[in-house]
Image (cartoon, rainbow, N blue to C red):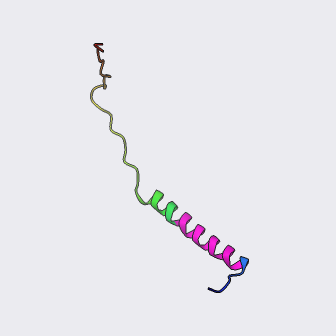
Amino acid sequence: MPQMAPLLWLNLFLMFSSAFLVFIILNYFMKSPQKMQKLPHQLLPNKTIWKW
């Protein structure tokens, strides 16, 4: 297997890192967030009675 110069390894690393960052950024902005709707009633926490 032929040796690669360190500069080529750096170019390869930068190319894959930039592609990964672009993929992550596009995934983040792909879906628009949905608005939260107010619930008609408040959610009450469940109170549990522990029987030991």
Say if 8 sits above or below 37 in the image: below
Q: Is residue 25 left or right of residue 31?
A: right
Residue drawn 68% across and 83% down? 3
Most foreground residue, 35 or 4: 4
In x, y percent, where is residue 24? 50, 61
Residue drawn 29% across and 22% down? 46
In x, y percent, where is residue 23? 50, 65
Q: Quadrant of the N terminus?
A: bottom right
Q: Quadrant of the C terminus?
A: top left
Q: Is residue 15 magenta?
A: yes
Number of marks drawn? 0
Residue 48, by quadrant, is top left
In x, y percent, where is residue 32? 41, 54
The magenta segment is 7-22
Q: Is residue 37 magenta?
A: no
Say if 36 sits above or below 47 in the image: below
Residue drawn 45% across and 60% down? 27
Task: Identify the main secondary structure in magenta.
Answer: helix
Residue 45, by quadrant, is top left
Check the image and name the residue furthest to the right.
6
Check the image and name the residue furthest to the bottom.
2
Say if 29 sits above or below 49 in the image: below
Most foreground residue, 7 or 34: 7
Q: Is residue 31 left or right of residue 3?
A: left
Residue drawn 33% across and 38% down? 37
In x, y percent, where is residue 2? 65, 86
Q: Is residue 34 left or right of residue 25?
A: left
Q: Is residue 51 left or right of residue 26?
A: left
